[in-house]
């Protein structure tokens, strides 16, 4: 009986650790998306959307970075999708 209690406690601890790691991974993924958009913006091969649009993209990147740091991953992802769309060339 005692072994079963210990096993359940160990299982609970083991299951809780991946949840904490997933939050960290989600933040890292969000910041990686920010980095990807910054790289896309800096790439000379991509078409330039113009100075006004580039300024807006820079603002979107700054806000998305802040949202990633705060844990608002969905909103950061939405802004980064908008920035990628502004930078996309056809």
Image (cartoon, helix red, strand yellow):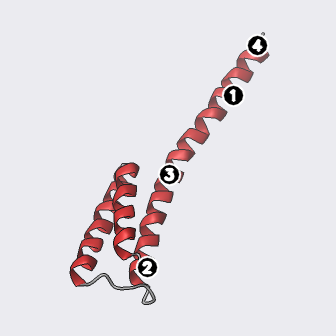
Which of disc 2 and disc 1 is earlier in sequence? 1
According to the image, label 2 marks what residue?
A: 90
Which of disc 4 and disc 1 is earlier in sequence? 4
Which of disc 3 and disc 4 is earlier in sequence? 4
According to the image, label 1 marks what residue?
A: 11
Choose mark 1 or mark 4, whichever is in front: 1
The answer to whether residue 33 is above or below residue 22 is: below
Q: Disc 2 and disc 4: Cα gap in Å?
A: 66 Å
Of the pair 82 and 73, the residue shown nearer to us = 82
According to the image, label 3 marks what residue?
A: 26
Of the pair 20 and 3, the residue shown nearer to us = 20
Which of disc 3 and disc 2 is earlier in sequence? 3
For label 2, the crowd category at 10 Å Cα-Cα, with few meaning under 14, some 14 to 19 and many 20 or more, is few
Would you say the residues marked 2 and 3 are in contact, meaning their CB atoms lie under 8 Å apart? no
Dot 4 lies on which element? Answer: helix
Choose mark 2 or mark 3, whichever is in front: 2
Q: Disc 2 and disc 3: Cα gap in Å?
A: 30 Å
Q: Residue at x 28, y 62 (%)?
A: 63
Q: Residue at x 63, y 33 (%)?
A: 15
Would you say the residues marked 1 and 3 are in contact, meaning their CB atoms lie under 8 Å apart? no
For label 1, the crowd category at 10 Å Cα-Cα, with few meaning under 14, some 14 to 19 and many 20 or more, is few
Q: Residue at x 31, y 81 (%)?
A: 49
Q: Disc 1 and disc 3: Cα gap in Å?
A: 23 Å
Left or right: 61 in relation to 12: left
The answer to whether residue 22 is above or below residue 81 is: above
x and y, in percent, of residue 76 in the image: 36, 56
Dot 2 lies on which element? Answer: loop
According to the image, label 4 marks what residue?
A: 2
Which of disc 3 and disc 1 is earlier in sequence? 1
x and y, in percent, of residue 16 in the image: 59, 34
The quadrant the N terminus occupies is: top right
The quadrant the C terminus occupies is: bottom left
């Amino acid at each position: 009986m005692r072994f079963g209690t210990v096993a359940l406690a160990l299982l609970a601890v083991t299951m809780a650790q991946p949840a904490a790691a997933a939050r960290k991974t989600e933040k890292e993924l969000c910041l990686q998306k920010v980095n990807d958009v910054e790289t896309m913006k800096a790439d000379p091969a991509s078409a330039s959307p113009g100075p006004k649009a580039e300024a807006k993209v820079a603002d979107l990147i700054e806000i998305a970075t802040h949202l990633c740091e705060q844990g608002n991953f969905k909103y950061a992802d939405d802004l980064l999708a908008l920035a990628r769309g502004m930078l996309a060339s056809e």
